[in-house]
Amino acid sequence: MSGICNFIQNTKYFKKSFKNYLRINISLYKYFFIDNPEIIKKKIKSLCNKLNIFGRIYISYEGINIQANILKKYLKIFKKKISNIHKDLKNIYINIGIDNSKISFNTLSVKIKKNIIFDGLQSFKLNINLNNKYLNSKKVNNLLYNKEAVFVDIRNNYEHKIGHFKNAILMNTSIFREQLQKIFQYIHKYKTKKIVLYCTGGIRCEKTSLWIKSNGYKNVYQIRGGIIGYINDCIKNNNSIEFLGKIFVFDLRLYETVTKDILSYCDQCNRKSDYYVNCINNKCNLLFIQCLLCSKRYQSFCSKKCYIEFHRK
Ligand SMILES: [Zn+2]
Ligand SMILES: [Zn+2]
């Protein structure tokens, strides 16, 4: 029987059909004015249903934010169709996931939100002429070892803990809104230097860039496509990858591996580890780092208390 299976797997037919079902993880966003988010929502939802796309999509008066999982063979069609939905979506930049061995989403959710990423900047009006300065991987690598430049990680502590650029400023915050409030505490010493912002896919840097420029910072740059864009650009152009560890992602996968460096520690025993788990006690659901030894000892519980509470039911 296995002989037949091997035979089938080696046929051209199998290889072709496997390719047909290959799914990839993508992300894309854009800040632009949308008069009627309902119409855009309908169009995007119908496109996703037609192309069998799963994901989490936010639409607002200020733009769109799409994290999705798509059949690779449909990527070209998707790019074309999304460009036709609105003139400002023409040639939109699409980030392709680094690790596509696991899928990011298995359902589709399309929602209208006040912001495409909540920033809490109520009095700060977004200028649509972003005019932000974007860096490719070659420029990033040059600036990483330049004393005149400072890298600022625009992500939360649980994200940068498992992976970041060497020597980057890491903020101790747990939500984006908090970062925008606290960022000046971290960067005020570097007002005259080149400030390079980065986040996972680039979206958080768009507003952060405007926000800090409106507070008097002049030399502000951001990485095109964030860390994911940087890695893909390094691979494409054969540049060395200077990012260490893993990229935290907000989907089923929890992370994408970039290098084997382990930068963080087990929350239960302090051994080096970077495996995130959610506490299996759903009343707790805490996101924490657990090493393999502790995973054997405590299973997927964050504490003895959660273990007892869960088994009491
Ligand atoms: Zn441990
Ligand atoms: Zn727990």
Image (tube, helix red, strand yellow):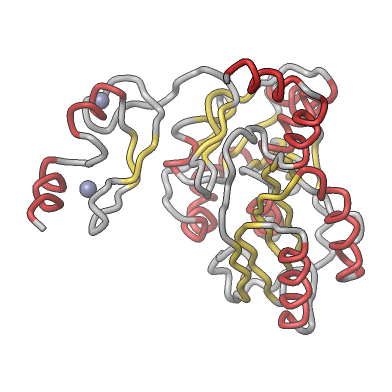
Q: Is residue 80 left or right of residue 276?
A: right
Image point 81% across, 28% down: which residue?
A: 139
- Residue 82 as seen in the image, left or right of residue 46: right
Relative horizontal placement of residue 35, taking residue 54 as reference (left or right): right
Nearest the camera: 215 or 308? 308
Q: Is residue 99 above or below residue 171?
A: above
Which quadrant holds residue 150? top right
Residue at 46 percent across and 31 percent down: it is 162
List x then y, in percent, for residue 51. 77, 59
Q: Is residue 194 above or below residue 94?
A: above
The residue under the point 73% across, 34% down is 18
Give x and y (percent) for residue 89.
86, 63
Write down the quadrant of residue 142 in the picture. top right
Quarter of the figure with the C terminus: bottom left
- Residue 62 position, x and y percent, is 72, 72
In terms of depth relative to the viewer, which is nearer, 305 or 108? 108
Residue at the location (74% across, 38% down)? 229
Q: Quadrant of the N terminus?
A: top right
Corner quadrant of residue 39: bottom right
Q: Nearer the viewer, residue 294 or 212?
A: 294
| Furthest residue in direction front, as rendered | 1
* 182 w.r.t. 32: above or below: above
Q: Residue 159 location in percent, x, y?
A: 48, 40
